[in-house]
Image: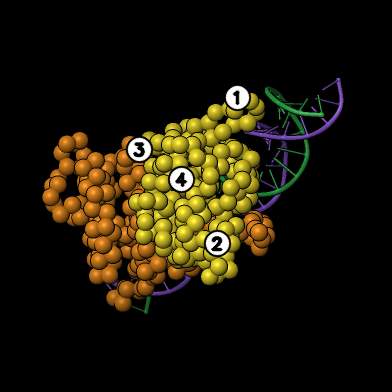
Chain colours: A yellow, B orange, C purple, D green
Amino acid sequence: MASLSGVPGKPKSKPRSRCPVSISLEIFGDRWSLLIIRDLMVRGFRTFREFRGSGEGISTNILADRLRRLEARGIITREAEARDRRKLNYRLTEKGIDLAPVLLELLLWGARREETGAPCAWIEDMAKHREAVLAEVRRRWQERDATPLLPRFAGGRLGRPTQHGYRATDVQLKAS
Amino acid sequence: MASLSGVPGKPKSKPRSRCPVSISLEIFGDRWSLLIIRDLMVRGFRTFREFRGSGEGISTNILADRLRRLEARGIITREAEARDRRKLNYRLTEKGIDLAPVLLELLLWGARREETGAPCAWIEDMAKHREAVLAEVRRRWQERDATPLLPRFAGGRLGRPTQHGYRATDVQLKAS
DNA sequence: GATTTCGCTTGCAATTTGCAATTGATATGG
DNA sequence: CCATATCAATTGCAAATTGCAAGCGAAATC
C-alpha cells in the first residue's frame, strides 16, 4: 500500500501517504507557511518586508525558503514591481485562496479555545456569517484589494471593540 | 505591542503573537500533531501502537513527544485499560473535537488540490453535507465509537469506489 | 560615484527530527 | 516462580532544520 517512494524534500525514505490530510501537511506542516498565507489572505500583505514585520519573528532564511516552497507548489506567485524591480509582490493563486476555509477554521478554533487577542464578538460574528466571510476573502483576492479583512469585514458594525479593552492591533490584522 | 515574553517551549525570545492563527500554529505547526488528531477523530485510533501504524512513518520519540504536548494543551487525555495497564487509550477532549472543522477543511483542500487517494465523489459528498459530517464526528466521539468515519459516513451509499479504481485502503481511513 | 534599499544568502550554533537499540513495567505461559 | 512477550516509551547518536546576524548582489536614489 504505502510505497517507499519517499516524501518530497526528504532524502530518507518515508511512506508516502495518500491521505489528503497528510498530503496537505507535507506542504503546511510547519510553523510558518500558514502564517504567510494568513498575511496574504487576511492582512493584505504582499512583500517580503511586510511578512518580516508580521509579528512572529520569522527569520529571513526561513521566510525565503517558505515563499519558495509555496510558489513551487502553485499556492502563490510573485512579480517584480514595474517601477522598482527590487520589490517583489507575492500573491495567492486560486489554489491558494482555496485555503480560506482552513485559515478561517484555524482562526475560529484558536480564538475560542486559546487565549488570544481576538475579540469574542468578532469571532462569533465571523462564525455566524461563515459563507459571507469566505466570499469576502475571495472578492478581495480577485480585486487585488490589499486592505485588511478585519476590522473592515465587521463593516464597522461592531465598531471599535471596547468590551474587553481590546484594540484592533491586538488582533494582528492590521495593514502594513 | 508584541512583548518579548517568548513562545512556550522556545528558550529563545520570540515575539508572542496574539493572533489566533499564530497561537493555533504554536500547537499544531508541525508535521505530526494534526495527523494524530486525524487518527483519533477519523480512524478511531486510540493506542500508541495504532498511531505508529498509521502509514506516515512517525518515529516513537516524536509520537511520544507529540502525545505529551497535545495532552499538556488539553486536547487529548489518556487512560490505562483496566484489564491491561500497559495499554494506554488516548481520547480527544471537547477542546480536541472542536478541531473537526479544521481537519475537514484540510482534508477537502488536500483532496481537491493535490493528488491523493481520496475518491472525488466522497469528497464532494462530504463538502455538500459539511454540517452532517461534523455532527457525525461529534456523535462518534461522544459515544466513544472507534469505527472509522469513512467509508461508513458515506452510509454505503457510494459503496465500493470503482470510478478511479481506488480502494478504501487508499484513503488511509481504515480501521486498525 | 557613494549610499541606501530590497530580497535574499551565508556561516555557524542551537534545536528538532529520525533511526534503531534499549529500557522498565506489565502480562502470559510453562 | 521464572522465562518470555508485549506495551509505551526512552536513549544515544546522526542527520536535518531552524535561528541569528552578518553579508551579498542587484536596483534605486542622492
Q: Amino acid at mark 1?
A: Ala
Task: Using the rendered image, report if marks 2 and 4 lie on a common chain.
Answer: yes
- Residue type indicated by callout 3: Glu
Residue D29 or B20: which is nearer the viewer?
D29
Tag count in the figure? 4
Where is residue B90 drawn, in percent x and y?
A: 36, 67
Tell me what residue is drawn at x 55 percent, y 28 percent. Answer: A79
Residue carrying label 4: A28
Q: Quadrant of residue A139?
A: top left
Q: Point out the frontmost of discs 3 and 2.
A: 2
| Residue depth check, mark 1 versus mark 4: number of the one nearer the observer | 1
Q: Do pointers 1 and 3 mark residues of a single chain?
A: no
- State the CA–CA distance, disc 2 to disc 4: 33 Å
The residue labelled by disc 2 is: A160
Q: The disc labelled 2 sits on which kind of residue?
A: Arg
Provide the secondary structure element on which disc 3 rests: loop
Chain that bears disc 3? B
Crowd tier of the residue under label 4, counting other residues whose Cα lies within 10 Å: few below 14, some 14–19, many 20 or above: many
Real-space CA distance between mark 1 and mark 4, rounded to the nearest whole angstrom: 31 Å
Q: Nearer the viewer, mark 2 or mark 1?
A: 2
For this view, does B15 lie left or right of residue A156? Answer: right
In the picture, the quarter occupied by the C terminus of chain B is: bottom left
* Element at label 2: loop
On the same chain: label 2 and label 1?
yes
In the rendered view, tell whether residue B112 sits above or below residue A174: above
Residue B67 is situated, as x and y percent measured from the top left of the image, at 44, 62
Disc nearer the start of the sequence (2/1): 1
* Residue depth check, mark 1 versus mark 3: number of the one nearer the observer: 1
| Up/down of A93 relative to B156, above or below | above
